[in-house]
Image (cartoon, rainbow, N blue to C red):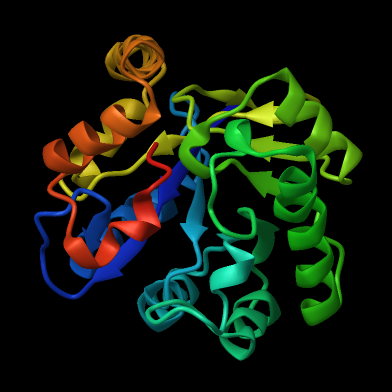
Amino acid sequence: MQRLFLLYHELRPEKAAYSYVVECAEFNRHLQLFVELQDHVPEVLQPSITFDDGHVSNYDYALPMLEAAELKAHFFITVGWTANKPGYMNWTQLAALQAAGNTVGAHGWTHSLLTHCSDSELDRELRGARHALEDKLGSPVTTMSLPGGRFNDRVLRACEAAGYLTVFTSVPRAEPAASHSLTLGRLNIRGDMTSASIRTFLEPRNPALRKLGRQYRLKQSAQSVLGDDLYARLWSILNRQEASSQQDRDAVE
């Protein structure tokens, strides 16, 4: 059996033009699909839910819907934003997510691109973030989600040295149910993705996921040619990024 990790960010009660926002009603339809697939439909990938950044909507909207559907998720937290940045969770809310049976992992300290960090900055983003989460939540943190999906061999070695056993990327690919790989891919869920379209990505014979994989490789080539700054500006335009979210998405996927 294989699984597909799904990457969400922010939920809202209403639709938004910004591609990183999923409407609550649509997210609930996604959950109903996942519940249906939990009945061990053999011909599909099993979905696993993840969230990046630590937006307060994860607590306000995602948590109640997850509990109603009896599903769990993996929340990756930008530690420096927690209890400090408007619109993001505080430690009490984060502890409530964990107490409800969800998993908490790290998403860096400042959401900086790890490939741009000095050795000391990389240590803070990785080791510092993990230690802060463990101190505040009282349980081990062994998973890391890469800001912007950016990594290289140096970053992966630093993740291992900082104590992470699993590193989540933004590479859209299926994973074995029992993987021993350091890195795991994820499918980034946009606001225009319906439960029907997500179902196609979960069908192994459907070429939709492989097509996204090819698009991802082309995007990596564009990032290399354009450089991160120009690529980020183009990304913001194409994804209808909102001014209030600009600094949150400086490290784009």
Q: Is residue 206 above or below residue 117?
A: above
Between 148 and 246, the one nearer to me in the picture? 246
Using residue 100 as the reference point, say whether residue 195 is left or right of it.
left
Which residue corresponds to the image point at 72% horizontal and 30% vertical from the top-left?
155
Q: Is residue 106 above or below residue 11?
A: above
User: Where is residue 198, by image quadrant?
Assistant: top left
Between 128 and 183, the one nearer to me in the picture? 128
Using residue 92 as the reference point, say whether residue 69 is left or right of it.
left
Using residue 147 as the reference point, say whether residue 123 is left or right of it.
right
Between 225 and 6, the one nearer to me in the picture? 225
Q: Is residue 58 above or below residue 199?
A: below
User: Where is residue 128, by image quadrant?
Assistant: bottom right
User: Where is residue 243, by image quadrant?
Assistant: bottom left
Q: Quadrant of the C terminus?
A: top left
Seen as rendered, the residue at the extreme bottom is 92
Which residue corresponds to the image point at 59% horizontal and 41% vertical from the top-left?
146
Q: How many marks?
A: 0
Q: Quadrant of the N terminus?
A: top right
Residue 135 image offset from top left, x and y in percent: 85, 76
Residue 179: tell me if it is visible: no
Residue 47: tell me if it is visible: yes
Residue 86 image offset from top left, x and y in percent: 39, 82
Between 214 and 234, the one nearer to me in the picture? 234
Which residue corresponds to the image point at 43% horizontal and 55% vertical from the top-left?
35
Residue 138 image offset from top left, x and y in percent: 86, 78
Residue 88 image offset from top left, x and y in percent: 45, 76
